[in-house]
Structure formats: structure tokens, C-alpha cells
Image (cartoon, coloured by chain):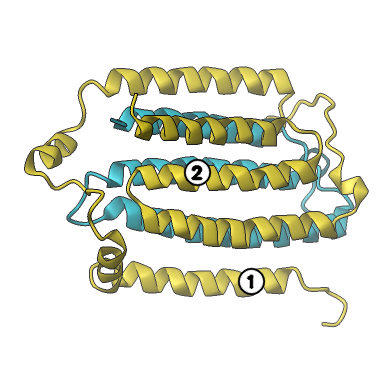
Amino acid sequence: MITLTHFLVVSACIFCIGLYAVLAKRNAIMILVGIELMINAAILNFVAFGKYDKENYGGQIFALFAIVLAAAAVAVGLAIILNVYRHYKTINPEKIHELKD
Amino acid sequence: MTIEEIVFYAFALLAVTASFLVVNLRNTARALFLFFVVLFAMAGLYLFALADFVAITQILVYVGGVLILLIFAFMLSNRELLDDLQNTSKRFISLPNWQSALLVTAFLAIMVYVFHSWGKHLPHWISEAEAKGTVILPTDNTVETLGFKFMTQYILPFEVISIFLMMTLIGAAHLSRKEDNT
């Protein structure tokens, strides 16, 4: 029998790996991948808890909304990364430290 | 150990090792292609929580959309963009490797400890749902129910998110266009 704790521990592992990518990577695309991993861990939690909500199906419906929001976030994020690359000729977040032209 | 548990542990192990490799590989192209494996394994895990429609959507949207977009962005960028510099820095958002590894391990330890102590006494609404039998069963037709819910109870968030998605896609197309011909 697979209990709720199994899902929670797996999603905690995935979330922490995503957090590591966000903290340690020097490449904006890999940081975006780390954010996607964290969103996936959150969706796994939604779905695991949603199993106990048959009246509203809240978990599964919110998981679907979260998937759509993540897709939108990636589209806009990649457009911004391409623009930043065109402007600064790098996507290393450390080297991008001024907002003016 | 039942066959269900074996398959669950296989998917969980696949997801965790593949995402670990995604983060640790120096080669960004390989990391992105390994991200496929992570997404498929996560879709398999959703199936174990009886969310088959969410699993299919995960494969359609993430593997078909998001990952293709990431690979396109990767292909459009040149070599210089891809080198993963690993020098030390003082800024918070890009800590050195060992510091972020320490932070992440501590966070993981706290979360796993909390989940283990929490799993012994579940929240009230979960035990109530188990007692009343309002738990999603493997025999339920979740896709049909989700369709009804989207068109009745959740119609407003559904419409709002479709407008939002259209706005962000138009915005992304506008942002990534060449600036010269305006």
C-alpha cells in the first residue's frame, strides 16, 4: 500500500534537487529547468492530496492549472533570456547586474 | 512487497536519479534530454495517485511544449552561452556548489523528518474522507468527472486561465521578436 508519506518524500527529494539547481547553476536555462523541477514536485503533492477529495477534485484541477501556469512561465522566461542574451551576450546571471541600457 | 510498490519505487528512483543527473551534468544538451526521463517518471508517479488525466497532460504540455521550447532556446544560443562557469561568487542567487549542497541537504533532512512525524497522525479531513469513503478509487472515471467539474464548478478559473495563457503567449512572441523592424 502506497501511503501519502511516500509521495511526500519523493516530492521533497525532487524539490530539493530543483532548489540546488536554482542556487548553484551559472546558466539561466538550467535555472529555469530547476524551477520546473520544483513545480513538478509541487504538482505531485497536489495530486497525492487530491486523492482524498472526491467531492471537488480540488487537487487534480489545481494541478492542471499549475501545469498551464508553468508552461506560460517557461514561454515568457525563455523570451526574456533570449532578449538578455541579445543585449549582454551572456546568460550567466552573475554577470547581469545592471538594469540600465 | 506487492507489484504496485515495486513499480512505484522504480518510478521514484528513476525520477530522483535522473533529476540528480540533470543537475550535475556539465553538458547542457545531455541535461535537457535527461529532463525528458524526469518528466516521464513524474507522469508515472501521478498515475499512482490516480490522476491519469494529469499524467497525460504532463506528457502533452511538458514533453510536447515546454521541453521542445527549452531545446529550441538551447539550439538558438551559441557556444559561449552554454559554458557553465563554476567559479566562486559572493552573490546569494549563485552560491558555490558546496554551500548550496549543504543548504539543500539540510532542507531535505528537515522536510523528510517533518513528513515522517506528520504521517502518523493525518489531518482531520483526510481521516474523515477515508471514514466516509469519499476517496478516489482506481475504478472511478476521473476524466469524465474532471470535464464536468471544469465546465460547471470551476468555469471561472478555467476561462481566466485561458485568457491568461493567450496573453502570456502573445507577450512571449512579442518579446522574442527582432527589434529592428519596428
Residue B162 at x, y = what percent?
45, 72
Q: Which residue lies most toward the bottom here?
A: B182
Task: Give whichever of B41, B1 is nearer the camera.
Answer: B1
Q: Which residue is mark 2?
A: B42
The amino acid marked with disc number 1 is: Gly
Q: Which disc number belongs to residue A2?
A: none
Along the horizontal axis of the image, is B12 left or right of B27?
left
Q: Which quarter of the figure is the N terminus of chain A placed in?
A: top left
Task: Identify the residue position indicated by label 1 in the image.
Answer: B171
Report the residue at 59% width, 36% height from top. Answer: A18
Which chain is drawn using yellow? B
In the picture, the quarter occupied by the C terminus of chain A is bottom right
* Between discs 2 and 1, the one toward the N terminus: 2
Q: Which residue: 69% across, 60% down? A: B69
Relative placement, left or right, of A45 versus A54 is right
Number of labelled discs?
2
User: Which quadrant would residue B127 be assigned to in this image?
Assistant: top left
- Asked if residue A97 can be seen in this view, the reply is no
Chain letter corresponding to the colour cyan: A
Q: Taking A56 as reference, is B131 above or below it?
A: above
Q: Residue furthest front?
A: B3
Dot 2: what SS? helix
